[in-house]
Image: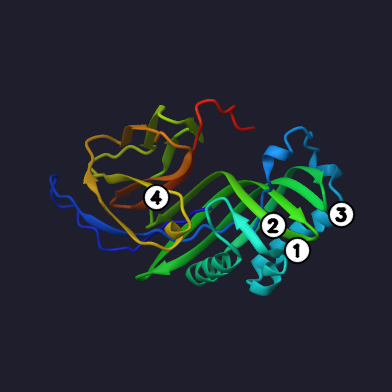
Amino acid sequence: MRFQTLMLQRLQMSGRSKVRSWQMLFGLAIAIVMGTGQLENLQSTAATPPASAPAPLQQALTQIDAAANSKNLQGVLQFYSPNFTHSDGLNRQTFEQALTALWKQYPNLTYRTELKSWQPIPNGFQAETITYITGTQTVDGQQVKLDATLRARQRFENQKIVQQEILSERNQITSGEAPPTVKLVLPEQVKTGQEFSFDAIVQEPLGSDLLLGTVVEEPVSSTGYLKPATAELELLSSGGLFKVGKAPNQPSSQWISAVLVRNGGMTMVTQRLRIVAASATPAK
C-alpha cells in the first residue's frame, strides 16, 4: 500500500495567475495484511467464505492487527518469513524499515482487517483481505489526516507470511479546517496500451475561491516508498482535474495521485492502477 504526505507550506492565493510549487514526500504504504502466493497454481481452487475460515488463520489476522495497533514491531514481524517477498519488491528487511518509518510519521495509526475469502494450500492458507488504516500527524502545527483502504491476496505457510500482492489501494490525506471533498474516478485496472480517464472532482461549490491542483504519476516500486518527489501546483479553471492517460506497453502498477488545494485546506487522493497484459482476464 502507498501513503503520501505533503510537507505543508503557507499557501498564498492572491493572484489568478499565480502557480505555487509544493514539495511532496511520498511516504510509506505498509498494510498489515498477509502476503499473496503464487496465484497461477491456485486458480483452480474455489475461494471459501470467511465464516468457515480455520481458527489459526482467524487468530493470525487478529494478532497481526493487535500488534500493529500497539506498535509492537516484533509482534508484527514474528508473522513474516525470513524469505518474505512482496509484489512491490519489498523483502522482510525493507518491510521492517518502512514500517518503522511509517509509525514514526504517523504514531497513532489504527488497523482493521476483514477476511473476505480463503482457501487451503500446501502447508497453509491463501486469503484475500481488506485492511482499513486511519491516523493523523502534525506538520508545522497543522493536523494531517490519513485514511487508506487496501485489498490484498495473500499466502500463509507454516504460520508465516511468505508473499504479498496488493490487488487494489486507495488512500486520502487531508489537512486544514475545510479541505475539499474530492470524488476520484479512475479504474483499478487497465490493459497495456489502453487509454483511460482520470477525474478528480471537487464536490463543494468554489464560489470566489481559487483552486490549485496537479496530477502525479509514479511507477510502483520498493524505492518509491521512501523517495521524495516534487510537483508543481497549477491554477485550475474548473472544479477539479480531468485527464486522459495511456497505460504503458508492459504490465506494471502505478500510483496516481490528485492534489487539490483551496483556501480551506488540502486533499490528496492516491489510487493504485494495475496495468495487465492485453490478453489477461479481469481481476476478481
Distance Cα–Cα, label 4 vs label 2 = 32 Å
What amino acid is found at the position of numbered circle 3 in the picture?
Answer: Ala
Judging depth in this view, the residue of 215 and 219 nearest the camera is 219
Mark sitting earlier along the chain (2/1)? 1
| Residue under the point 71% across and 58% down | 161
Please name the residue that numbered disc 1 is placed on. Answer: 63
Please name the residue that numbered disc 4 is placed on. Answer: 268
Mark sitting earlier along the chain (4/2)? 2
Label 2 crowd (10 A; few <14 / some 14-19 / many >=20) = many
Percent position of residue 233, x then y: 25, 49
Distance Cα–Cα, label 3 vs label 2 = 19 Å
| Residue under the point 74% across and 38% down | 42
Distance Cα–Cα, label 4 vs label 1 = 31 Å
Residues at circles 2 and 1 in contact by the CB criterion of under 8 Å: no
Q: Is residue 116 left or right of residue 241?
A: right
Distance Cα–Cα, label 2 vs label 1 = 17 Å
Residue 72 is at least partly visible in this image: no
What amino acid is found at the position of numbered circle 4 in the picture?
Answer: Met
The residue mark sitting in front, 4 or 3, is 3
Q: Quadrant of the C terminus?
A: top right
Mark sitting earlier along the chain (3/1)? 3
Judging depth in this view, the residue of 7 and 201 nearest the camera is 7
Distance Cα–Cα, label 3 vs label 1 = 12 Å
Mark sitting earlier along the chain (3/2)? 3
Percent position of residue 121, x then y: 80, 46
Q: Secondary structure at mark 3?
A: helix
Q: Is residue 2 left or right of residue 141?
A: right
The residue mark sitting in front, 4 or 2, is 2
Please name the residue that numbered disc 3 is placed on. Answer: 55
The residue mark sitting in front, 3 or 2, is 2
Please name the residue that numbered disc 2 is placed on. Answer: 162
